[in-house]
Image (cartoon, rainbow, N blue to C red):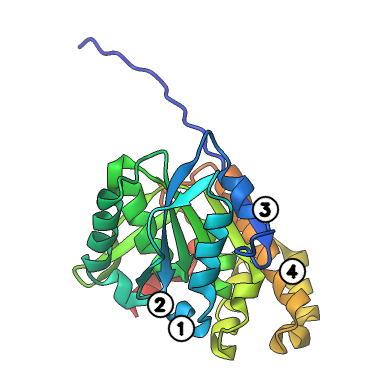
Amino acid sequence: MAAIQRFIQVGWQLRVFFSENVFAPDNPVLRDALADAGPRKALVVLDDALAQAKPDLQAQIETYFTAHAATVRLVRPPMFACGGERAKNSHSLVNEIYSQLQRHHVDRHSYLVAVGGGALLDVAGFAAATAHRGIRLVRIPTTTLSQADSGVGVKNGLNAFGQKNFIGTFSPPFVVINDFQLLSTLSPRDKRAGYVEAVKVACIRDAAFFAELERDAERLAGFEPAAMRQLIRRCAELHLDHLATAGDPFEKDSARPLDFGYWVAHKL
C-alpha cells in the first residue's frame, strides 16, 4: 500500500519568570512577557479565595492593565472563579470562561491570564487550550505547590466519571510568572503543601538539592522567605529540565518519573 509519511517537529518555548508584586504598575515583567505587535486583549480569571484574602488585588490588576494598555488591554474586570477540586469537578467554570472569551472576542492572538492555585490553573488552561484550538495562556500561580510544580508544567485537566484529570490536554503555557508576594496570605498548611513535591523531585533528580532541603529544614519550617524562594525556584527548574530533556513531555510512554506516587494518591 502506498503511503506518504513526514516527520513533523514542533518546538515549544516555556518561560518561567520570578518576581514580586507583579501587578505593580512599575513592574515590567508581565508587560514585557506579553509584548507583541499589540495591543492584545486579555481576560483575567482570578481565584476568589485569593481575592478575598487580598481585597485590593482586583483594583491592582485593573490599574496595571490601564497603565500598560498600549501593550495589552483588559477586556473586562477580573472574572472571579472558585479554586480547589470543586473547580475541576464540573464543566460550569469552563463554560463560564468560554462564554467570556466568546463575548469579548478573545482569539488565538489574545491572552487568558489565570491567577490562582493549581486547580484553577488546570481549568483555565483547559479552556485556553480548547477555545479557538488554543488561546495564549498566562499562568500566575499563587500557592507554593503550583509555583513549584503544576503551574510550570504542561498539563490541564478536569475530573470526570469519578476519575481525576480524566479530561485534559497537554498544552504549554505562553508564560508563567511566579510572584512570591502572592504566597504571603497562605495559611501555614498551604505554605507547607508544596514542600513534599520538592522533596520528591529532589529524591528523584538531585541529591544536592535534597541535602540542601535537609540543611534548610528549620528555615523552611519557619517559612523564611529566602529559603522558600530557593525551594520553589529549584523545584521549578528541575521540572522544566525534565520536560525539556527527558524526551517525553507529553507522556506517550508509561514512565513518568516525576509523577511517582500520583496514581496511588489519586485512587486513595
Q: In the image, is 90 to the left or to the right of 78?
A: left
Q: In the image, is 132 to the left or to the right of 143?
A: left
Marker disc for residue 48:
2
Judging by the rendered image, the residue that carries numbered circle 4 is 230
Q: Amino acid at mark 1?
A: Gln
Q: Amino acid at mark 3?
A: Pro
**Quarter-of-image position of residue 221:** bottom right
Residue sitting at x 43%, y 51%? 42
Q: In the image, is 219 to the left or to the right of 48?
A: right
Element at label 1: helix
Query: How would you rate the neighbour count of disc 4 (Cα within 10 Å): few for under 14, some for 14-19, many for 20 or more?
Result: some
Marker disc for residue 52:
1
Q: Are marks 2 and 1 in contact (CB under 8 Å)?
A: yes
Task: Report how far apart the C-alphas of labels 4 and 2 lie in the structure.
Answer: 28 Å
Please report whichever mark, 4 or 2, sits nearer to the chain's N-terminal start: 2
Task: Report how far apart the C-alphas of labels 1 and 4 lie in the structure.
Answer: 28 Å
Task: Tell which of 244 and 102 is nearer to you.
Answer: 102
Can the viewer see residue 15 in this picture? no
Query: How would you rate the neighbour count of disc 1 (Cα within 10 Å): few for under 14, some for 14-19, many for 20 or more?
Result: few
Residue 8 is situated, as x and y percent measured from the top left of the image, at: 42, 24
Residue 236 is situated, as x and y percent measured from the top left of the image, at: 62, 60
Q: Amino acid at mark 4?
A: Gln
